Image (cartoon, rainbow, N blue to C red):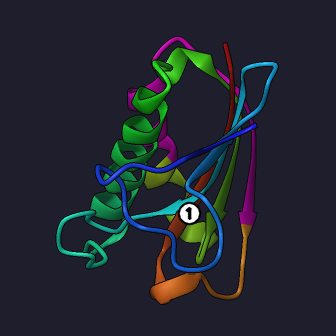
Amino acid sequence: MKKINTDKAPKALGPYSQAILTNDQTLYLSGQLGIDPISGELESGIEAQTKRVLNNINAILEVVNFNKNHVVKTTIFLNNMDDFQIVNSIYEHYFGDHKPARSTIQVAKLPKNGLVEIEVIAKN
């Protein structure tokens, strides 16, 4: 098992790794928020946050030479289910024809008052 961390994605907000790569080449990414890794600030609005989340996920995948096509499962946490269509459109554009399994859940509150968080499982 290997801890994965990169400066190209935001630092963890608590005592956890950005991702863990297991011996069988399964990558478990911690939930990513729409935080700019350079400024440490949350992007403004659901569209910008969703795009940043996917960019952050991509940065972590690249550390282990994975890409979006290695993603087998995502879990999306939304602060407001009314944002579902916007998030879904950006998500669909990002993944294209690759369609990993997915759950979408509305939550009462996300860290840093984020609007969207996505966690990922990827497999080589």
Residue at 52% from the left image edge and 44% from the top image edge = 88
In the rendered image, the quadrant that contains the N terminus is: top right
Residue at 61% from the left image edge and 48% from the top image edge = 19
Image location of residue 49, percent across then percent down: 35, 63
Compared with residue 109, is residue 102 higher up or lower down, i.e. above or below? above
Q: Nearer the viewer, residue 19 or 99?
A: 19
Q: Tell whether 65 sits left or right of 25.
A: left
Q: Nearer the viewer, residue 77 or 31?
A: 31
Image location of residue 18, percent across then percent down: 55, 55
What's the amino acid at mark 1? Glu
Quick check: is 91 in the magenta stretch?
yes
In the rendered image, the quadrant that contains the C terminus is: top right
Please name the residue that numbered disc 1 is placed on.
117
Q: Magenta segment range?
A: 88-105
Quick check: is 89 in the magenta stretch?
yes
**How many residues crowd around disc 1 within 10 Å: few (fewer than 14), some, or many (20 or more)?**
many
Compared with residue 58, is residue 116 higher up or lower down, i.e. above or below? below
Residue at 65% from the left image edge and 67% from the top image edge = 16
Image location of residue 22, percent across then percent down: 77, 31
